[in-house]
Amino acid sequence: MNTFWTKLGLFAGGVLFGTAGIKILSSKDAKKAYTHTTAAVLRAKDCVMTTATAIKENADDILADAKEINEARAAKEAEEVDDTSCEAEA
């Protein structure tokens, strides 16, 4: 019988805690806190997106420079091959 009252007491406490929790979570102060938290998250998102855009632009610049370097190197190597073939003919 003692177990019954313990379980009933725990159930009643849970219902009371749940009801109070819902009232607290839906209060004006809680909504204000949710609003401020959401605003902070949106500001952080904007900051992260700005940083990500800057990183992407820098990566695009690096990639373009690397392609130019490789093209110049390939052209130089092609010239060297042409010079070598001319010497072999002479």
Image: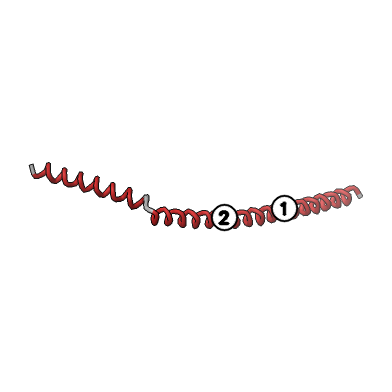
Q: Residue at x 29, y 50 (%)?
A: 20
Q: Is residue 1 above or below residue 44?
A: above
Of mark 2 and mark 1, the one earlier in the sequence is 2
Residue type, label 2: Asp
Q: CA distance from mark 2 to mark 1?
A: 27 Å
Residue at numbered disc 2:
46
In the image, which is nearer the foreground, mark 2 or mark 1?
2
Please name the colour scheme applied to the rendered image: secondary structure
Is label 2 in a helix, a strand or a loop? helix
View extreme (front): residue? 28
The picture places residue 6, in percent across and down from the top left corner, at 14, 46
Q: Nearer the viewer, residue 30 or 3?
A: 30
Q: Residue at x 88, y 51 (%)?
A: 87
Is label 1 in a helix, a strand or a loop? helix
Q: Nearer the viewer, residue 78 or 34?
A: 34
The picture places residue 49, in percent across and down from the top left corner, at 58, 54
Q: Residue at x 50, y 55 (%)?
A: 39
- In the rendered structure, the answer to whether residue 88 lies left or right of residue 48 reads right
View extreme (right): residue? 90
- In the rendered structure, the answer to whether residue 69 lies left or right of residue 16 reads right
The disc label shown at residue 64, or none: 1
Q: Are marks 2 and 1 in contact (CB under 8 Å)?
A: no
**Crowd around label 1: few <14 · some 14–19 · many ≥20 (10 Å):** few
Q: Quadrant of the N terminus?
A: top left
The disc label shown at residue 34, or none: none
